[in-house]
Image (spheres, coloured by chain):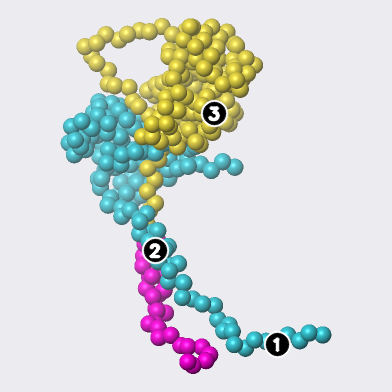
Chain colours: A cyan, B yellow
Amino acid sequence: MPKFKKNSNTSEDIPTAALPDIIFMLLFFFMVTTVMRETDIMVKQQIPRATQLTKIERKSLVSYIYVGEPKNVVLYGSEPKIQINDVFITEDDIVGFVNTEKDKLDEVERDQITMSMKVDVDVKMGIVSDVQQELRKANALKILYSTIKRVSE
Amino acid sequence: MPRGKKKLPEVSSGSMADIAFLLLIFFLVTTTIANDKGILLRLPPPPDPLQEQLDIKIPDRNIFTILANSKDKLLVEGEPFEGSMDELKEDVKKFILNFGKPTPEGIEVYNSLPAQMKAYVNTNGRDPESSDDPTSLKSIVSFKSARGTSYDLYVGILDAMNAAYNEVYASRVGITTEEWLSLDRSNNLQKEMYNRGRSGIPRAISIAEPD
């Protein structure tokens, strides 16, 4: 019968020298992917899901419009509201907003401005179509309904 | 030379992991993975008051109508529709690939289709009551919602309509829909593929204003 002798020379603890490296790798991943949010979104944002998503090539051409029920119902009521940057606006202000956004772009790119509509799932089409009519007036014809990828079952 | 293990001088790096963890947790909390994806739509230009409204007569068979009411109920081609969005997508696809009464351009498009799609057209797409052919103004998918329709349903239908077109384009050039959606148009080869998929079959999605 063979005898197994325990080799007492080998150390038993797991080497943790590579642990900082792993953590640093994760850290860099999150540092690179992170986007500091500059605007405080004051409306509910549960984005709908869809399958046929296109990606925006030029992020500089995108302006965001948020539509949804205000988070602070006591202060702003429960009717869906339109938010741009940090403020609530009415439909009439959209043309002005689009024009200020267009002014930030080069002259040749102005008609390529893309309005990204971040609309909550509980919103009805009425307000969305009002916004669209204003966007047509302002000649911002490219719109993107922001959605999340739906994973098929 | 000494025998046995030689101890290497080391800087203690035990707390390195702690520091990294602290930073990691900070970024984990503050991060929002940017999602700049969505369904792209081009709005029609604003109506020009000086220009007279052109009244183009398009026969009913060439328009696939989807209506949604405030109760989120659908009416597709005049019939109440209870099925899933996938079934709607199949219906739209069948409508696009219908060659009921093809024009010369339509025949050209048919000849450019791969064999598999020709077989699909020959089994499903010879209905004279449906669209003439997939070319411009011969098959239009029209969607009208009401003011009370939920945005969720609106996006769902928009998605289904786009899915039908993308499937047609993708199978025309022999790739999957996923691959079609990730085609990079700045790459010449892929742009050529993109143009080949779309040639002759414009994405004719018409969204009517809700009343």
Residue shown at the point (42%, 79%) measured from the top left: B14
Q: Which residue is mark 2?
A: A27
Q: Secondary structure at mark 1?
A: loop
Magenta region, residue range? B1-29
Residue shown at the point (31%, 53%) measured from the top left: A37
Q: Nearer the viewer, mark 3 or mark 1?
A: 1
Q: Position of residue B146 (x, y in %)?
A: 43, 26
Marks counted in the figure total 3
**What is the C-alpha distance between the residues marked 1 and 2?**
44 Å
B3 relative to B147, above or below: below
B78 relative to B201 in the view: left or right = right
Instruction: Name the chain under label 1.
Output: A
Q: Is residue B96 visible?
A: yes
Amino acid type, callout 2: Leu
Q: Is residue A82 visible?
A: no
Instruction: Name the chain under label 2.
Output: A
Discs 3 and 1 lie in a common subunit: no
Amino acid type, callout 1: Lys
Q: Which residue is mark 1?
A: A5
**What is the C-alpha distance between the residues marked 3 and 1?**
64 Å
Q: Residue furthest right?
A: A1
A49 relative to B167, above or below: below
Q: Which residue is mark 3?
A: B174
Decide: few, some or many residues near mark 3? Use Cα within 10 Å; few <14, some 14-19, many ≥20.
some
